[in-house]
Amino acid sequence: MIFAAGKGTRLKPLTDVIPKALVPVGDKPLLQIVTERLVDAGAGNIVVNVHHHAGQIKNMLWMMAKAYPVDIRISDESMELLETGGGIKKARPLFNADEPVLIHNCDILSDLDLRAFYNDSVQSGAAATLVVSERKTQRYLLFSSDMRLVGWTNIQTGEVKSPYPEIARHNGRTGMDWASEGLGMYAFSGIHCLSPEAFPLMDAWPDRFPIMDFYLRHCADVEVRGTLKPGLKLLDVGKLDTLAAAESFLG
């Protein structure tokens, strides 16, 4: 699944007239770049959600469906943007029921071996696997020594989210040394793999919710793992000043 429904507010004024998914990097829009990466990795079925300038994305998907050996399906959120978790929940009928789903933000570029990541995620048996990195940010996911997700923190505000009381009790504490608690801090990449076993847990959730809230709520109930790829090259093409860097990134 490719997330392509966002409004792309950080890319204004470009996204006043085109959706973020169609912002060009070099001679191709982001959506096409990510689609080609997924096709090269062996994807046979790609679901794309749409909202902002939905008609433009649908036209692009129609053209790509004729050009690539892949079944492209559209999850239409034109009436209401459902956030990442709600987007996955709405798209569930479009997925192959018994297969894990690789989920990829349309504005993320990386050199990750997507086929290897997917295969490893399937073999691990985890309910979800999140690609993480050591990049600097204000918001980090917290992992146990065996890379199981246990929480989230904003290091600037000290906010902490975790289903584990011994971690949640540090909420509001800035400058927390998580390493002393035996925990690793890593940044989420926007690429993850979700097992069918996790979908029934979404039934109790509303139509609109962030997927990270879902992972943080249920990481004590099911296995949500992180995978750290040393040397991973990753770029979030979310701001105007990253577009030039994106062209260099793709080489």
Image: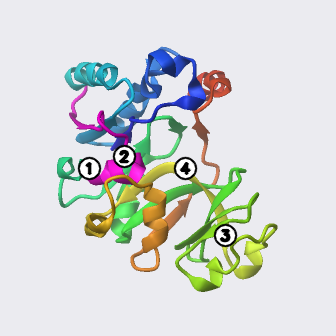
Q: Is residue 242 above or below residue 95?
A: above
Q: Do we see residue 40 in this rendering?
A: yes
Going from N to C along the chain, the mark reached first, 2 or 3, is: 2
Tag 1 near tag 4, CB within 8 Å = no
Which sits in the foreground, 243 or 169?
169
Distance between the Cα atoms at labels 2 and 1? Answer: 8 Å
Does 117 appear in magenta? no
Q: Amino acid at mark 3?
A: Gly
Taking the spot 56% from the left edge, 74% from the top edge, the residue there is: 162
Going from N to C along the chain, the mark reached first, 2 or 1, is: 2
Going from N to C along the chain, the mark reached first, 4 or 2, is: 2
Q: Amino acid at mark 1?
A: Lys
Nearest to the eye among marks 2 and 3: give it: 2
Residue 85 in the image, given as x and y percentages of width and height: 38, 54
Which quadrant would the N terminus be assigned to in this image? top left
Q: Say how many tags the image has.
A: 4
Tag 2 near tag 1, CB within 8 Å = yes
Q: Amino acid at mark 4?
A: Ser
Report which residue position mark 4 lands on: 189
Report which residue position mark 2 lands on: 82
Nearest to the eye among marks 2 and 1: give it: 2
Give the residues in magenta: 68-89
Distance between the Cα atoms at labels 3 and 1? Answer: 32 Å
Distance between the Cα atoms at labels 1 and 4? Answer: 22 Å
Does 70 appear in magenta? yes
Mark 2 lies on a secondary structure that is loop
Report the disc number at residue 90: 1
Report which residue position mark 3 lands on: 184
